[in-house]
Image (cartoon, helix red, strand yellow):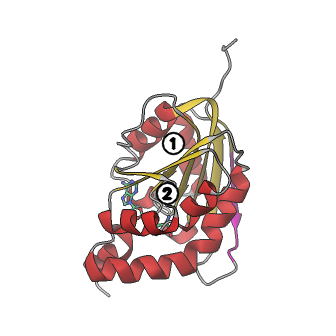
Amino acid sequence: MSTTMLDRAFGHPHGLLGRIGGALMAFANGPEEEHVVAVARLTRTETVLVVGPGPGVGLAAAASRAGVVIGVDPSEEMLARCRERAANALLRNGSAADTGQEAESVDVVLSVNNVQLWEDRAAGFAELYRVLRPGGRIVLSTHEKALPVPRHRLAAEAEAAGFTDLQSWTWEPPRFSGTAAQLRAWRSDAGRS
Ligand SMILES: C[S@@+](CC[C@H](N)C(=O)[O-])C[C@H]1O[C@@H](n2cnc3c(N)ncnc32)[C@H](O)[C@@H]1O
């Protein structure tokens, strides 16, 4: 498959290839999406922003555990799949760097298999920091082989945007999608009474 076809299927899903890509991602990445939701330990009172939910497996898992769930994806094809899987989620066309979300309005940000697609990672981390409430957390996961920089460097980039208490590790999914690199970090609430 050419790079353009791969991008239409998985990177920026569109048309028939996007629909096929969405079905494949739901199967292959579903366990990773659900694992990230489990790591985030969502509660019923929390508002969660899911960045790049793709076909919506993680979005649906988050919607069954949290209070309010918002999905932001630049692909209309994927937003349609998300609507089918999680009718109660709020969905919006956007990107990591431009979520359309108010400042300090979410408790948790989840991002699975899209950090490698962010056009500007510094702008993406800055935006996700901006929308998190102080004390809020981000959980990010992506196929290690797709990482644009080593995972410790990615953690340093998140730290440069203001995130604290960074943890990063690898996780082996049960299917064939390969080792995932994962990251968890907080927006500090220090200084707040
Ligand atoms: C490889 S798919 C992963 C989908 C799903 N999270 C999964 O793991 O199966 C990448 C998703 O990120 C979206 N995406 C592309 N560029 C993005 C960006 N700059 N910010 C957020 N999401 C983006 C794509 O539209 C697509 O739905």
Residue visible at 43% across and 37% down in the picture: 127
Segment colored magenta: 167-173
Ligand 1 quadrant? Answer: bottom left
Q: Report if the beta carbon of the residue with label 2 is closer than 8 angstroms to ligand 1.
A: no
Q: Which residue is mark 2?
A: 149
Figure quadrant of the N terminus? bottom left
Residue 1 or residue 35, whichever sits in front = 35
Q: Is residue 58 left or right of residue 131?
A: right
Vertical comparison of 8 with 112: above or below: below
**Residue shown at 66% from the left, 23% from the top:** 189
**Dot 1 amino acid type:** Glu
Q: Secondary structure at mark 2?
A: loop
Q: CA distance from mark 2 to mark 1?
A: 10 Å
Q: Is residue 25 magenta?
A: no
Which of the 4 image quarters holds residue 64? bottom right
Residue 125 percent coordinates (x, y): 47, 41
Q: Which residue is disc 1 drawn over? A: 157
**What amino acid is labelled 2 in the image?**
Val
* x then y, percent, for residue 34: 65, 65
- Percent coordinates x, y for residue 113 in the rendering: 50, 64
Is residue 168 in the magenta section? yes
The answer to whether the residue labelled 2 contacts the one labelled 1, judged by CB atoms less than 8 Å apart, is: yes
In screen coordinates, is 108 left or right of 122? Answer: right
